[in-house]
Image (spheres, helix red, strand yellow):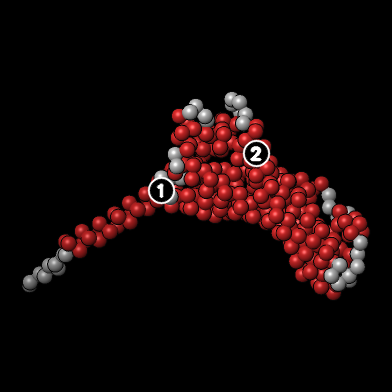
Amino acid sequence: MKIVIPKIDVNKIASHSIKISEKTLAKSELANEFLLGIGNVVLFIQRIFTEMFSGRAEFKEFIYQCYQMGNKSLPLISVTGTIMGLVLTIQSRPVLAEFGAESLLPGMVAISLIREIGPVITGLICAGKIGSGIGAELGSMKVTEQIEAMEVSSTNPMKFLVVTRVLATTVMLPLLVLYADALGIIGSWIGANIKGDVTISLFFSQAFSQVGFNDFIPSVIKSFFFGAVIGIVGCYKGYNAGRGTESVGKAANSAVVIGSLLVLIVDVIAVQITDMLL
């Protein structure tokens, strides 16, 4: 009886094992880069808090950044806030009219704007407007070696550039949110007068009769976290930009994308915490 031994293609097995090892190596490199990125972000945040509570505060630069961020964002926030209230009123009024509950429209719009729509939409707008500006500004300073020049001249760039911008976004975003909420309610009054006739004093009294401190406080608190997230992401991407000119655009783009995503994630966490506490 003749025994047949199958032929084994050694080259095929070797190439297959090489492909498997390359895929494993690529996955491990991605995991290492991800963990390294998280570590760098944690160290960056730790350095921000360390510089924030040590040494002399850059108060003038902080005030200037607050003015820049607030003043340049007012036109966009004004238009967006008014349109939010106007559109929400126009779309909600027919539904409430079917049930004869048009009198509940001001309170519903006010609660919707104050609790959720105002903070989230304002946070996303600021992530695009302010976050991209911080990323591009610090990225261009990194490319042109201005940050290294500040270190040589005994100026702390982390305190002067990063801490002031993070504090400015943290302080200004809640103010912009309250401003957007106020304009949203005014826009709602304009929408209510398109097919009706209600005075602004009556509309505001009906709106704020349904609003309490339990609606204001959580939205203001999470707005502080929105501002801190936007400032930290923009500063981190700009401060750690590469050397080429393309890195400036990448820093600004990634600051917008990651900042907007983190605003939504923080909002989900804040809603869950508020639901458990209240």
Tell which of 5 and 229 is nearer to you. Answer: 229
Tell which of 186 and 6 is nearer to you. Answer: 186
Q: Which amino acid does label 2 sit on?
A: Tyr
Q: How many numbered discs?
A: 2
Position in image of residue 209 (x %, y %): 88, 54
Report the residue at 63% width, 55% height from top.
124
Does residue 206 appear anywhere in the picture?
Answer: no
Tell me the CA gap for discs 2 and 1.
Answer: 29 Å
Side of 135 where 183 appears, left or right? right
Report the residue at 86% width, 72% height from top.
195
Residue that mark 1 sits on:
244
On residue 169, the disc is none
Side of 251 where 26 appears, left or right? left
Q: Residue furthest top?
A: 55
Q: With respect to residue 91, does 27 lie above or below?
A: above
Q: What residue type is labelled 1?
A: Gly
Residue that mark 2 sits on:
64
Q: With respect to residue 93, does 241 lie above or below?
A: above
Position in image of residue 140 (x %, y %): 48, 45
Q: With respect to residue 13, does 242 lie above or below?
A: above
Q: With respect to residue 257, does 144 lie above or below?
A: above
Tag 2 and tag 1, C-beta contact below 8 Å: no
Q: What element carries label 1?
A: loop
Position in image of residue 59 (x %, y %): 65, 32
Which quadrant would the N terminus be assigned to in this image?
Answer: bottom left
Q: Is mark 2 on a helix, strand or loop?
A: helix
Tell which of 233 and 151 is nearer to you. Answer: 151
Does residue 213 appear anywhere in the picture?
Answer: yes
